[in-house]
Amino acid sequence: MSQPEGAVAPQPHVAHEAHHEEELGFWRKYVYSTDHKVIGIQYAITALLFLLFGFSLMMLMRWQLAYPGSPLPLLGALLGDARMPGGTMLPEFYNELGAMHGTIMVFLGVVPLAVGGFGNFVLPLQIGAQDMAFPRLNMASYWLFFLGGVTMLASFFVPGGAAQSGWTSYSPLANLAGTGQTWWLIGMVFLITSSLLGAVNFITTTIQLRAKGLTFYRFPFFVWAQFVTAFLLLLAFPPLEAAAILQLMDRLAGTSFFLPSGLVVSGQVLAVAGDGNPLLWQHLFWFLAHPEVYVLILPGLGIVAEIIANNTRKPLWGYRPMVYSVIFLGFMSFIVWAHHMFMTGMGTTMAAFFQTTTMIISIPSVVILTALVLSLWGGSIRFNTPMLFALGFLPMFGIGGLTGLPLGLNVTDIPLHDTYYVIGHFHYVVAPGTIFALFAGVYYWFPKATGRMMNETLGKIHFVGSLVCMNVIFMPMFIQGLAGVSRRLYDGGASYAFAEPVLHLNVVSSWGAWILALFQIPFIVNFFWSIWKGKAAGENPWEATTIEWAAPSPPPHGNFRVAPEAYRGPYEYSVPGAAKDFSPQYEA
Amino acid sequence: MDIPYTVEVRRDTGLTNGKIGIWLFLASEVMLFGALFASYILIRAGAPSWPRGDTILNVPLATFNTIVLISSSVTMVMAWASLMRGRFGTYRMYMGATILLGLVFLVVKYFEYSHKFHDGLYPSTSNFLAIYFTLTGLHMLHVFGGMLVNAYFWGPGSKLWKTNPVWFTNRVENSGLFWHFVDLVWIFLFPTLYLL
């Protein structure tokens, strides 16, 4: 098709053998690497650090919520008088922490770990590719993400501190906020560009670099989940970029896209052109942020599916319906966004439409979760650490999902909107949901990445402690929310009489959070100890069937010794008549 | 290590990696400009009054610019077609013309902008001007970006023609796809802002 006349076609490229690669220097090998595995690990480690940092912000807030107004011992003095005079947290600092906790956890923690980390490391291996389709774009994607993260962190040090208008940055509040908000917007533009490059790369890689014989219905479910996620990132993020551009214009060029006429601030009418629409920000923001919810959860579902199939030693129950569901889910996620906006007065017709689509989108989610639960039926389950986290994920994500239904219906959402019930709901989805799935993934693919196993005992302590603490933190929030406590109170509700009966639960949640932090120590120790001292793992320590286990552990640059081929579906465990209880995709 | 299908097409998809990549990128660009056009509709629908574009903006200049951009799309196709025929010299000429036409567009836009500023019309003056400056400004950034890529393929990037003409031709085709997209955005912007 695009063959110039008279041009000589280049010689077909001979597949290089991995060990003939020229040796790269330190910087090219570990820092400015174009190898998808190194980039994946860079993403994963950066994201894990951001998760820890975002969690620390929340632990500070939990002190103020549990013991409002009391000085924080030790740390309080360290944070300085501008933020915590005498060790007591100022409301502005509380708002900073709240906005940045949300931003960091979503955009710098979970998504980069789930998509940038696991997607980059596992997806090319699972489809039998040597690398991503655009390795240099992949490197640019990581470094843009890094730059976005640095921008967000630096915003803590600008006059007035970091963004304080919540992770949703609603206008007009965010229009009028301090310099930190401008930094937030610029940071977001970096992060959006980063995920755009990533999404283009993932989709192209999946379509083009599949191994021979690996048809779409032979994809492991993880690949499907990442593939759909990439489309969500590709198409949902640009409207947020548009929104960020408009808010930047409002803040820097004095436009009034989001500012209505006659807005009174501190007793004075704001001197702007006016006629803007604050709801426009919410529409643009949630047009991204609802698909973003599925960006948070789909890779997690993919990881859990892999681990459940592997550790029940049987095929996934209902692989095809799961695939159809994930595609349908991706599509539907674009037309449910306004269920976040029932309280804005956008009208009952709109509300009726969006609550209907919201109820419809719950169906494929339930199909996938049900298929995963049914996959356990009749399996001979191995209870190793990855499997425990995957099993923990199922009921936790179930609680998160089911408590979302009352929020998706207009009538029941009105009393629950902006209460702790909402916080409880989406944290069940993301914290003991997605983050458990991500932990499961770390334990599961750690041997592939390092060539060594993680310690099982430490892993089990990590799991049990985290499972208990997560519930101690988030279960009380449902009770507080049903009692009507708003999620945005600096004193945790102490100034409201109706919150009195549930106020003590703030202390419970806070201690849950701090003890949860202690239970992450075994994970951190395990992680570093196992890199050097863990039990050596062979190519396929879990006796799994998917193609990534055909590569050496850790895989060299270029991944496979010989280009793998796929001969069968992804989950052929316990095939009757086979010599062993797993028949790998890559074995003829 | 060489990534497969950068030059030759994959048999079952019939595509190179770059071709898929550029179309995906354009899809996301459609969502970016789509969101801004949607914002335009929402803001205009909610405004108590909205000026007709031609009462504020210079329609003859914009018409001229429309012709300039459409011509640049034609020269872009000619540049690619010249490579397909193996005529590198003609390619250089047409590609150069594409870059120059882009430059003409930006210069005309510069005069339009400075005239507005001279009359005291700023983005902060009204929401009509706010959306005008935002949309055309973002579009100009895209024109500028496209010109940079084209200039690279006109100059240093064209060395690839000697070593791998197929790859070079594909790259020019992809950069052309982006250039046509930028042109297409203008074809939507012109009536929306200047005429309606």
Image: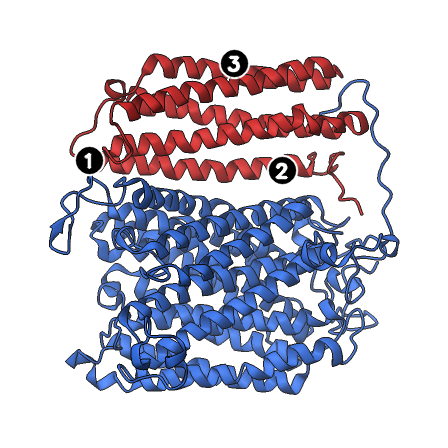
Chain colours: A blue, B red
Q: Amino acid at mark 2?
A: Ile
Q: Left of A107 or right of it: where is B88? A: right
In this picture, residue A508 sits left or right of residue A447: left
Which residue, given by chain and number where applicable, does mark 1 sit on?
B47
Task: Please give the label number shown on residue B20.
Answer: 2
Question: Where residue A239 appears, x then y in whole percent?
Answer: 41, 44
Relative image position of residue B6 (x, y in whole percent): 73, 38
In front of the other: A329 or A292: A292
Q: Amino acid at mark 1?
A: Ala
**If the image is split into quadrants, where does the C terminus of chain A sit?**
bottom right
Q: Same chain, marks 3 and 2?
A: yes
Q: Give the label, 3 or 2, closer to the camera.
A: 3
Q: Is residue A232 visible?
A: no
Q: A512 and A471: which one is in front?
A: A512
Q: Residues within 10 Å of mark 3 (few under 14, many from 20)?
A: some
Q: Residue at x 28, y 51 (%)?
A: A171
Query: Which residue is found at the position 33% from the left and 46% from the top?
Result: A247
A312 shown above or below A121: below
The picture places residue A352, in percent across and down from the top left corner, at: 27, 52
Is A17 above or below relative to A77?
above
Q: Which residue is mark 3?
A: B71
